[in-house]
Image (cartoon, rainbow, N blue to C red):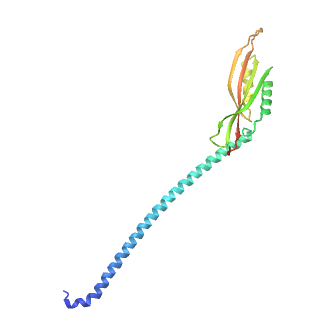
């Protein structure tokens, strides 16, 4: 046992031990705080990495989609579907189709360009010019040959809006098929995004 006379001599060593325990406790607490801050920083860094990775993957997807859309748009531009209408080409196509189908007479009227609406709310607008056609044919095959030739047009996307056919009142043995069609020549026009 420790006698009371030994206490003054143990005062400094006990004080040193107490101080060492306090410093050790402070070090343990500091290390624990640093560890907690490190874990929080790691979690933040991992979350930031995941978000950045997700944005990167999204950007890659958007880039692939944009390349696809630009490629398709370039094809449409090369075909002549984008920009000013090629009305003279269409008239020439109609005349050639009439000749190749062997139609004796063909009357047509090309109406003004009208808007079909914006293309996905961008600076492009889909438009159509309606052409009214009227003719008479002896056989339906000639009409189909004529329409097939027109539908092969590259400078627009022709679409048959409607056709009306009726047998004419003729004195001849074979009555002619009277045909009236409305054909839309669909193109894309660039619009001013500021307007």
Side of 192 relative to 107 (left or right)? left
Q: Position of residue 104 (x, y in %)?
A: 81, 19
Side of 83 relative to 69 (left or right)? right
Q: What residue appears at the point 77 percent right and 31 percent down from the top-left corner?
A: 90
Q: What residue appears at the point 72 percent right and 41 percent down from the top-left corner?
A: 77
Q: What residue appears at the point 59 percent right and 52 percent down from the top-left corner?
A: 60
Q: How many numbered badges does the structure rendering display? A: 0
Q: Position of residue 122 (x, y in %)?
A: 64, 43
Q: Position of residue 190 (x, y in %)?
A: 70, 42
Q: What residue appears at the point 81 percent right and 24 percent down from the top-left corner?
A: 99
| Residue 58 visible from this viewpoint | yes
Side of 180 relative to 10 (left or right)? right
Quadrant location, the N terminus: bottom left
| Residue 101 visible from this viewpoint | no
Specify the quadrant of the image occupied by residue 126.
Answer: top right
Q: Nearer the viewer, residue 111 or 104?
A: 111
Specify the quadrant of the image occupied by residue 185.
Answer: top right
Q: Is residue 72 above or below residue 100?
A: below
Q: Furthest residue to the front?
A: 195
């Amino acid at each position: 046992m420790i006698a009371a006379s030994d206490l003054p001599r143990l005062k400094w060593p006990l004080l040193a031990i107490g101080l060492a325990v306090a410093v050790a406790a402070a070090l343990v607490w500091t290390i624990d705080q640093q560890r907690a801050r490190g874990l929080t920083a790691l979690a933040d860094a991992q979350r930031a990495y995941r978000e950045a990775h997700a944005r990167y993957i999204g950007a890659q997807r958007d880039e692939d989609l944009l390349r696809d859309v630009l490629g398709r748009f370039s094809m449409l531009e090369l075909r002549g579907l984008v920009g000013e209408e090629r009305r003279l080409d269409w008239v020439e196509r109609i005349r050639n189709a009439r000749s190749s189908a062997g139609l004796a007479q063909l009357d047509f009227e090309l109406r003004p360009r009208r808007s079909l609406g914006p293309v996905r709310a961008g600076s492009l607008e889909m438009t159509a010019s309606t052409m009214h056609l009227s003719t008479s044919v002896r056989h339906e095959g000639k009409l189909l040959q004529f329409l097939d030739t027109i539908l092969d047009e590259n400078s627009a996307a022709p679409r048959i809006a409607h056709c009306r056919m009726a047998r004419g009142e003729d004195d001849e043995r074979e009555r002619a098929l009277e045909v009236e069609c409305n054909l839309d020549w669909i193109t894309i026009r660039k619009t001013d995004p500021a307007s």
